[in-house]
Amino acid sequence: MTELTAARALVRRALIAAGAIALLTPAAAHAAFGVQSFRADVTESDQTTLFTQAGGHPAYGITDFTMNQSGGLPVGDVKNVRVDVPPGLIPNPEAIPKCHAAEPSDCPANTQVGTTDVTVVVRPLPLQTPVNGIPVYNMDPPPGKVSDFAFGISALGIPVVDRVDIIGGVRDTSDYGVFFTISDIAATPSIISTKLTFFGVPADHGTGAPRKPFLTNPTVCGPPYTTRLTVEDHSGKVATASDTTPTGATGCDKVPFDPTVAVTPGTTRRDSPTGATVALNVPQLLDPDGIETSHVRDTAISLPEGMTINPPAATGLQACTDAQLGKGTHDPVGCPAASRVGAVEIVSPALADPLESPATRCFVDGRRLETPFVLDDPASEAPIWDVELRDTILSRYAYFGERHGAFVYRRK
């Protein structure tokens, strides 16, 4: 038995021994597996007052839940947790340095993004042991995920759980909001409650990180926001809960929005076939004391007068169906190479790397040409590209019409 294993066993025995007196406590009525209470808010510095400024940066983001109990013990042992936050409420892991260590206990202070409080028990004795103020760090995310925040749990100075990962993802087949999951939590110790507190601006908590905002409110003023919690125990039982704010975001009249667009043809020679580069730029302020620029919802770009679609360039092109494109799914793209007409690059300050994709020629209802843009009227004098970018933190969106002769530039 290693020294660490022996120490962990000693901690568990100490917790059990210290809880012997709890056996004298009368048992409570039996309850079903479920969530006793759930709170999810973004707040002012008092951690109580709701922060509502659209595009603003709250002081804290708090998620707090407690499980049902019977006789001082949780009903069921939590295995998996998922929290779905409102669309537009964005944590930015790229604003804070990342920890590259294997264990959170080895992470530098400037990678801390918050804290967590956990109350656990070691069955069979109902001694509830709170462990508070555990640092949460910004880690390198696994492939295909947008973020990874991790912490470890210690009791009496001894590590009990080396690492718990809070993995962030995007609901990219629905409303494009963010969700967080914790998976495969050990049954021992068993969780009674947990409170996760994200720092709105980690540098304000003495972490030593650059003073940049980590949390940003939605930039849409509308109905109240709802956060949803899903919990699964080791037997497969599932419990859900939700928390809705009394109001949605406010102050949308203060939210800035000043995008620019540039269209650059490959040539300006009259009646010449050419490709084109279309670049949409949305300034990102990243001011911890200010209000962030509005998220992009929809974009329509009118090409310069005289630039038209070149029908002869379609010769030899193949069409890509929605099924081949895998639209609305995570299926691999199966579009034929001959359907490619360009490339798309999206840059966001919340992502480590640009999103890149070929632009393909697709028929929709047999009527119009679709790429990641939708080319609504191929016969018009000034074609319009309709770009669907729902609630996106966008720095730059660029389309490169790389197929020779896709456009004709007719200078007047």
Image: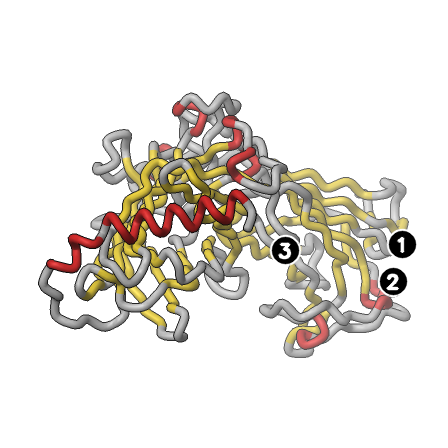
Q: In x, y percent, where is residue 9?
A: 42, 51
Image mark for residue 62: none
Circles 3 and 2, Cβ within 8 Å, touching? The answer is: no
User: How far is disc 1 from disc 3 in space, using C-alphas?
Assistant: 33 Å
User: How far is disc 2 from disc 1 in space, using C-alphas?
Assistant: 8 Å
* Residue at position x 49%, y 27% in the image: 212
SS under mark 3:
loop
Q: What type is the residue that disc 2 sits on?
A: Ala
First in sequence, mark 3 or 2: give its number.
3
Residue receiving disc 3: 144
Q: Is residue 55 visible?
A: no
Q: What type is the residue that disc 3 sits on?
A: Gly
Q: In x, y percent, where is residue 236?
A: 40, 75
Residue receiving disc 2: 313
Q: Residues within 10 Å of mark 2 (few under 14, many from 20)?
A: some
Q: What type is the residue that disc 1 sits on?
A: His
Q: Split into 4 quadrants, where in the image is the C terminus?
A: top right
First in sequence, mark 2 or 1: give its number.
2
Residue receiving disc 1: 404
Judge by depth and name the residue closer to the eye, 219 or 361: 219
